[in-house]
Each structure stands twice: as structure tokens, then as C-alpha cells.
Amino acid sequence: MKFFKWVLAILLIIIAIIIVRTFMHNPQTSAAIDVVTIDIDEDRASQHLSQAIQFATISPQDPAQRDHAVFEQFIQWAADTYPDVHREMSLQRLDDTLLFKWQGTDATLKPILVTGHYDVVPVIPGTEADWLHPPFSGAIADGVIWGRGALDDKSGVIAMLEASTHLIRDGFKPARSVYLSFGSDEEVGGENGARLVTEYLAAQGVQLAWSLDEGSFVLDDIFPGVDKLLAIINVAEKGTLNLEIVGKSAGGHSSIPPAKTAVGILAEAIVALQNSPLPGGMEGLSLEMLDTVSRHMPFVPKMMFANQWLFSGVLNHSLSQMPVTNAMLRTTTAPTMLSGSVKSNVLPIEAVAVVNFRVHPRDSLDDIVNHVSAAVASDAVEVRVPDASGKPASEVSDWHSDGFATVSTAVQQVYGDLVVAPGLMVAASDSRHYSKVADNAFRFNPFIVNADAMTGFHGTNEKIKVADFTQGIRSYIQIIKNGAQQ
Ligand SMILES: [Zn+2]
């Protein structure tokens, strides 16, 4: 009897600890930030974004198919539409990429860079008719601006130009120099855009305090159970690595096959690889983000995040089951291309799978090669590293820095009570170039995005609400103003 009393007592203590910890897992309180009111001419700004979308500044995969004239037309349109920016700032053109400099009054302060890109991805042939409004119409209907680039990333570029115009007309003078860079080839790697800008800045001896590029957004209703808007400011981006997994076997005629052909050997290797994901879990950046967000979750998930001493195993397991959260926890594994024999009755000597890995900051490229080699180890399987295929993850920028606080304060001044957390970018951006000349590189667009809008990225029916676009302009006004003042 006494034994059961002890068990009961211990159980009650554990439950008490869990409950107390859950109730202590509250949002971190900081000084209240006053919301600013900024008058924006919504109609005029929307018209400008609409006009910008109508230039089909497509970055095709094949550079030979690039329509240079339309980039030239866009650049001319920007000069005509934003005379204040062109008068007040100096412009350095690098190929089709535009780098503006707004000279600050205090040369001892490191400059900042606010950047986006005005090239867009093509519309997949055959899907044009699926668009409610043609992709390059820039149609404005029912408070929504439609078209390719409405989110990625002409909204960013135009909002920065509108914000700069607003500040110039307000008589604002930056203390810190402000660079604005508008890339023309982000969608194909930024080699003739962001890379040239980065080299130009480096040659001028410029080291930026911070840069702000596209990335995450102000997320609306994306995390289940979190009612507040969530500004995820990405402080790092994943790298990428392609490996070839090769199954090998003797060739010959398919009428007398061995028990396993090269294809069967390869198939087993891929299954082994899928069953052996790279290690990962909540730590560092992903822990910081999930810890911050979980403070706004309903009781049960909040309880689990508050008591990781007990639930970390369950949490890591369930977060790994969902593709979006899994990508934040580890290097992901995606077999994407397959090849085997050239003819149906010829046994392949080699069957090859290309596997694309998105590299988490915790892993080096060598870590991945070693992990994969161990997972598929067999005399009949080879792991090949194609030349120059890999880029490691970026460095992780400091989310306790002044630059992060500047962007965070700006969005709170515009949106009021919202949650700000650092995040990890799972795709690639121009920031892998810009970060070479910046103490900290942030990746964030201050526009509200919900699950419906997400489908427009590189997809069909890309669009942005007029109200969300203008909130973005207000945010860039505050970001540039706060950033250039301190
Ligand atoms: Zn983009």
C-alpha cells in the first residue's frame, strides 16, 4: 500500500511540474511598441505594381531565350515612374540589375542594403488558361492585384520604390547610407545580378551592417492553433547538394537476367536511403523559432513544448512526419532523377539516381556524403559527387542583433500585436551572394501571406491583396527609416 502511495505522490509531482511549466510558457513580454499611421495612396501604388507586372521580365532556364528588351523597358519605366528616387539616389547599373545608393550623413555608420528582384519565373506552358486573370495582365479586381511577380518579388521591389519615394517627399535624410538593389536574374541564381552587386560593393570596400532580402512573410493562419500574425524573419538559408547513387551489375541480354539487375540494386539503395534520413531535431535556430511560436499555441502543444524534458522525443517524431517542419529540422533527402538502360531488352551496366539534398546549417557537405555512403553501403553501389554540385548552408545571422531588432520593430509598428521569430529559409535566395558583404543577412518580406496565397509562388494565380501590399509599403518605410537612423 505504502508503495502505491509513493508512486501516486511522484506522479502528482510530475503532473504539477508539467502544469506549472506550461503556464510559465508565455509570450516573452517586451516594451509595447506604438503603431504608426502612414498615409499611402493605395490606388496609385497598386497601379504601379500592376504596370510592373505587365513587363514579362522572365528569367528562362536557357539564357539564350532571355528577352533583353523587356528588361530594358522595365528599367525605363522605373526611371519614369520613380523620378524622386532617381534624383535623390545615385544609380549603378550592373548588367540589368539596379543598385541605388542613398548617401547617409554619417560616414562612420555601416550602410544597410534592402533588396528584391524584378525577374520572374515563366508560366508553365499549357496552364495559362487556369489563371483567373492572365498572368501578365496585372489585373486589379476586388481589391486584389493579379499576375506573375505579385508576390515573388515585384511586390517587394515596387514597395521599396514606393517607400523610398514616400520618405524622400517627407524630407527624410538617412544618417546611415542605404543601398537598394533590384536583381534581374534571381530565379536563375543571381550570377549576373546579386553576385555582381556583391563584387561591386566589396571592391568599394563596403561592409554592410545588414541586408534584407526576400524570404519568409507575415504568416496568417499557417501554424495550426496560432491566431496571431507571425513574422518569421529568416536568418539563414539551406544549401543544396546533388549526389548520384549508382547501382552496378554485369550487362547482357535481358532474356537471361541475373537475380537483380542494376535497377533492382539501385532501388534497394534508394529505399535504404529513404529509411535512413539525416539526423536532426529541435536545436539552435529551429528550437528558437518553435519555442517562440509554441508560446501562442493551444494548451496541449504548448504543454509539450514547455516540457521538452519529457516530450522532446514525441515532438521530434511528429515534427519529422510533416514535410514543412521536417525541412526545418534536418537536411532533407529527395531522389529526383532516374536513368537505366538505353533499350528495353538490354541489361543496364549502371542505373543512376540523382538525389537532391537541402543542406541544414548543422551539416557539412562531407557529413552528407559520409552519411549516404554508410546508408547505401554495398559492393554493387557507388556514391558519386558530381563536380561543383554542392553549396553548404549559409551562416546563421544573429537574431539578437540591432538589425534584427530594427526589422522586428518596424513590422510591429505597422501590424501592431504580432509574433516575431527567427526562421530558416528552406529554398535559396540572392542573399547567399549579399551575405558575403553583410555582418547579418535577413530574409523576409513584410507582406501578409496565407495558405491560399502560398500556392501562387512559381505556380498559378499568383496574387496579392491591395491592403496587404500597402501594409508592406508601410513596413519598408519603417524598416528604411529605423535602419538608416541608428
Ligand atoms: Zn523570389
Image: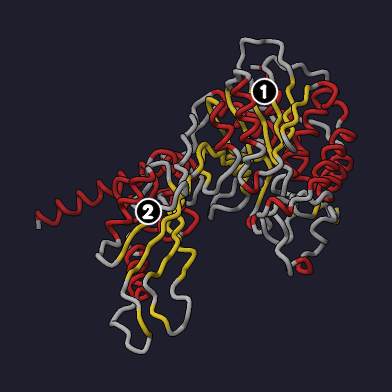
Taking the spot 31% from the left edge, 75% from the top edge, the residue there is 250
Residue 149 locus on image (x, y percent): 74, 50
Taking the spot 82% from the left edge, 38% from the top edge, the residue there is 75
The residue carrying mark 1 has its beta carbon less than 8 Å from ligand 1: no
What amino acid is at disc 2?
Answer: Leu
**Residue 126 in sight here:** yes
124 displayed left or right of 379 = right
**Dividing the picture into quarters, in which one does residue 461 lie?**
bottom right
Q: Secondary structure at mark 1?
A: helix
**Dividing the picture into quarters, in which one does residue 139 lie?**
bottom right
The answer to which of 443 and 354 lies nearer the viewer is 354
* Vertical relation: 342 (above or below) 210: below
Question: Which disc is residue 315 wearing?
Answer: 2
Taking the spot 37% from the left edge, 84% from the top edge, the residue there is 253
Q: Secondary structure at mark 2?
A: helix
**Residue 326 in sight here:** no
Residue 279 locus on image (x, y percent): 33, 51
Near mark 1 (Cα within 10 A), the count class, few <14, some 14-19 or many ≥20, is some
Question: Which disc is residue 482 wearing?
Answer: 1
What amino acid is at disc 1?
Answer: Asn
Extreme residue in the bottom direction: 255
The answer to which of 38 and 461 lies nearer the viewer is 461
Residue 391 locus on image (x, y percent): 47, 44
